[in-house]
Image (cartoon, rainbow, N blue to C red):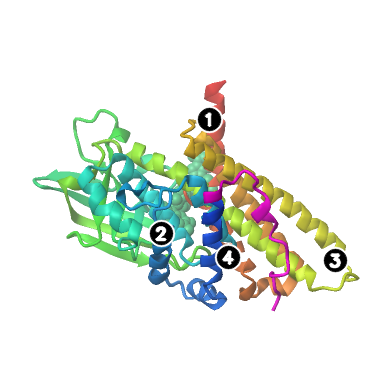
Amino acid sequence: MISTESLPKLHQHSSPFLSESQRQWLEKAQAFADAIPLSDRIKSDVENVFRRDLFESACKEGFGALPFPTTYGGSGGDYLSFCLVNEEFGRKCVPVMSSLGVHVLCQEPVYKFGTEAQKERYLRPSSSGKFLAAFGLTEPGAGSDTAALATTARLNGSHYLLNGTKTFITSGGSADYYIVMARLQDPSAAVSEKTITAFIVERGFPGFKIGQKFDMLGMRGYSTCEIVFNDCQVPLENLLGEHGWGRKVALGSLAKGRVTIAAQATGWAQGAIDAAAAHLHSLPEHNADYHASVAQIGELAILTESARVLMHQAAYAIDRKDPDAVTLASMAKIQATDIAMRAATEAISIMGLAGMRREHLVERIFRDAKAGQIYEGTNQIQRMLIARKLTKES
Ligand SMILES: Cc1cc2nc3c(=O)[nH]c(=O)nc-3n(C[C@H](O)[C@H](O)[C@H](O)COP(=O)(O)OP(=O)(O)OC[C@H]3O[C@@H](n4cnc5c(N)ncnc54)[C@H](O)[C@@H]3O)c2cc1C
């Protein structure tokens, strides 16, 4: 077994600008991740099983609502701290990482657009881990093109009736409530996009059903499912924001979500480097490939550090409510996921057969990084968004 214990933990010292509180969150995340046996990390991936118990433990540690004020049970941290936690979880392949990221993403619109009653009903139990949240935007015919959403909502007395299917929903099979975007059937709305409206849908509402569970290449163990609405009865008070605010609700959360993914992916890249470096450490220096592989790791370390700096910058922009945060979030997401994919690919090449074995986690990182390039807006689409913004500005 290759050990990474003897290696310097370079990245932990590479951010001289971190505050004391940010460092404490990082240390807490390290302790949490290290306490999960390697066999458990592998099992949830191989068996594609969601660890609700670990999610609840993570919430007890304060990770479940880290970047929200204490008013509704949040931990009062900043977004950069949440990113530091996510980087550490990505690096060590903590099984609940993605569900936790989405859970925090879902609290954002409730915090920002929710009524007082919604905040009381959903935020506090989300902080404690009693409730798990999921985000329902993607549909079988509407991935990148959110304007093609076909799920409908119709006012019917004291309820909205939702009909349609959402697909690839992280935590879909395990969540207690879902932030769902549906097209309100409102003949008075002039522009169809404006009819996209957000709702909070509880798992127990009549007409709600969990659909097929996905057996995916990567990002396994997160209960990724379809959710189906069949005349699903959503009480009027579960409208989130106002009619036609769906895009505003969704896009506001996704910008933060992209920085979270950048953090997770920086962790994947670091995890791949750790494993490859530990492998080289265990080889005799006269091995023919040794020096070339050392140079390759040096190159990956430079790229990973650049992704980390961009991710920190995007998180910092979010904390400062900087209008450029959205563009920086896209840049950080692209950079970190592409570098994670490259680091995992090259780490496996450096390690040879050892890199293909589950216990070194690199093959998992390789599979997860591929998913990272796709979800919450593919990297191709993010590039277009960045270019469109710059073109408009010029
Ligand atoms: C692991 C995982 C978890 C997910 N979790 C969630 C979740 O919790 N909630 C949720 O709502 N969704 C979730 N998704 C869905 C995810 O957000 C979508 O996969 C993503 O938006 C891309 O949509 P798509 O897969 O349908 O690809 P498509 O939109 O079909 O795109 C396919 C390809 O075409 C390219 N393309 C598409 N349109 C254009 C264009 N106009 N110009 C140029 N290129 C284009 C894309 O870049 C991509 O390469 C998840 C996906 C994954 C893989």
Q: Is mark 1 within 8 Å of ligand 1?
A: no
Residue 170 tag number: 2
Query: Where are the magenta residues, as a range?
Result: 1-21
Label located before the other in sequence (3 or 1): 3
Secondary structure beneath disc 1?
Answer: helix
Residue 92 tag number: 4
Secondary structure beneath disc 3?
Answer: helix
Spatial CA distance of label 3 from label 2 is 40 Å
- Foreground mark, 3 or 2, reads 3
Label located before the other in sequence (2 or 1): 2
Percent x, y of residue 342 = 68, 55
Q: Quadrant of residue 187?
A: top left
- Mark 2 and mark 4 residues within 8 Å of each other at the beta carbon: no
Residue at 59 percent across and 46 percent down: it is 18
Neighbourhood count class around disc 1 (C-alpha, 10 Å): few under 14, some 14–19, many 20 upward: few
Q: Is mark 3 within 8 Å of ligand 1?
A: no
Residue 290 tag number: 3
Q: Quadrant of residue 57?
A: bottom left
